[in-house]
Image: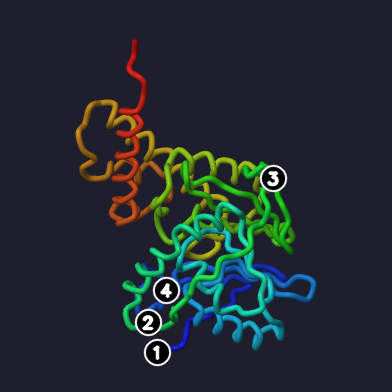
Amino acid sequence: MPAFAIRFEPLADDLWWVPAQAGEANAGNRGQVVNLVLARHRGRLWLLGSGPSPAFARALRCAAWRRFGLDIRAVANPHARAEFVLGNAGLAGARVVAPAPVREAMRAQCPQCVQRLRERLGEAAIDLQAAPVRLPRALPTPRGRARAMDDPQRWGPFEWHLVRRADRSWTSAWRHADAGVTAAFGLLWFDGPPDGRDTEPAHLVRALASLLAAAPAGERFIGDTGPPADRGAAQRQLDYWRTLWRAAQQGVAAGATQAGEPAAEVAEAVEGADGWRDHERHRLNWQRAWRLAEDALFAAPAPR
């Protein structure tokens, strides 16, 4: 198998991102399809995400030692996605943690996710080995609820808080205050339109609006995919979800019976969203938003 494509791109002093490869997980990219973030703090390396497999994580650890002369001893799992957390098992001796709802999602989802990832990876599934799942320790969350954006918790050089993506789906946002960088995995994508799988537009609108309201001027953002981006790119995704959800609700309320082709005005109404109209993720987002709008309409109490 070819070597993993591991690069450390500087974001600021003592902060780097490890770029993801484009597309869905497959044998060619070996599942390396979600960005990672690495920080140096108090003589230690702190890692957000661990990658798609134990084999990848071991390669990342070796690359970090060669580059920085330090071992990765602290790892956080901000979001429960196989390509983002199955490296845990390859980081022997490191302390691995996650917000409690993220850990619970991993416990419930990982067995099925591993099988799906094996199928996608093909010959590269050897990277997963026999038992790739290592659950993190739970970071305590006060009263089991998300904290406000202005009341985060601390993990090493990062401040973090829980974010709801859907009624039963959580992620977390992690901010490196010294660098002015926020990592928002499962919320932001910077290689095209966002990915709405396992999300609900209404929750994403609230989450992104709060994230942007709390972000200082000049903040940069790291998403699942694509390069670091500025506030305008994050705002574009908030505008997209607002427009998409409103269009789906209006279409359902008007009595249309199926989603059909994605509403052209959704992508066209979002300034700077060139090429989103024909993107596969946009089509899937539209179908999901339409179904959720139908569900909401049918669940609403009948007028008296």
Q: Position of residue 249 (x, y in %)?
A: 34, 32
> In whole angstroms, how far apart are the C-alphas of marks 2 and 4?
9 Å
Q: Which callout, 1 or 4, points at the residue further toward the start of the chain?
A: 1
User: Is the Cβ of the residue at disc 2 closer than 8 Å to that at disc 1?
Assistant: yes
Residue at horizontal 38%, vertical 52%? Answer: 197
Q: Which residue is mark 1?
A: 1
Q: Amino acid at mark 2?
A: Ala
Label 4: how many Cα within 10 Å (few below 14, some 14–19, many 20+): many
Q: Which callout, 4 or 3, points at the residue further toward the start of the chain?
A: 4
Judged from the image, the secondary structure of the residue bearing numbered disc 2 is: helix
Q: Which residue is mark 3?
A: 142
Judged from the image, the secondary structure of the residue bearing numbered disc 4 is: loop
Residue 290 located left or right of residue 166? left
Looking at this view, name the residue that lies furthest to the top. 304
> In whole angstroms, how far apart are the C-alphas of marks 4 and 3?
34 Å
Q: Amino acid at mark 4?
A: Gly
User: Is the Cβ of the residue at disc 2 closer than 8 Å to that at disc 4?
Assistant: yes
Q: Which residue is mark 4?
A: 31
> In whole angstroms, how far apart are the C-alphas of marks 1 and 3?
45 Å
Looking at this view, name the residue that lies furthest to the right. 42
Residue at horizontal 28%, vertical 41%? Answer: 263
Residue at horizontal 56%, vertical 83%? Answer: 58
Q: Which callout, 2 or 1, points at the residue further toward the start of the chain?
A: 1
Viewport quadrant of the C terminus: top left
Label 2: how many Cα within 10 Å (few below 14, some 14–19, many 20+): some
User: Is the Cβ of the residue at disc 1 closer than 8 Å to that at disc 3?
Assistant: no
Q: Position of residue 166 (x, y in %)?
A: 46, 44
Does 66 appear above or below 220?
A: below
Q: Which residue is mark 2?
A: 124
Query: Which of the two discs, 4 and 3, sits closer to the camera?
Result: 3
Q: Which callout, 2 or 3, points at the residue further toward the start of the chain?
A: 2
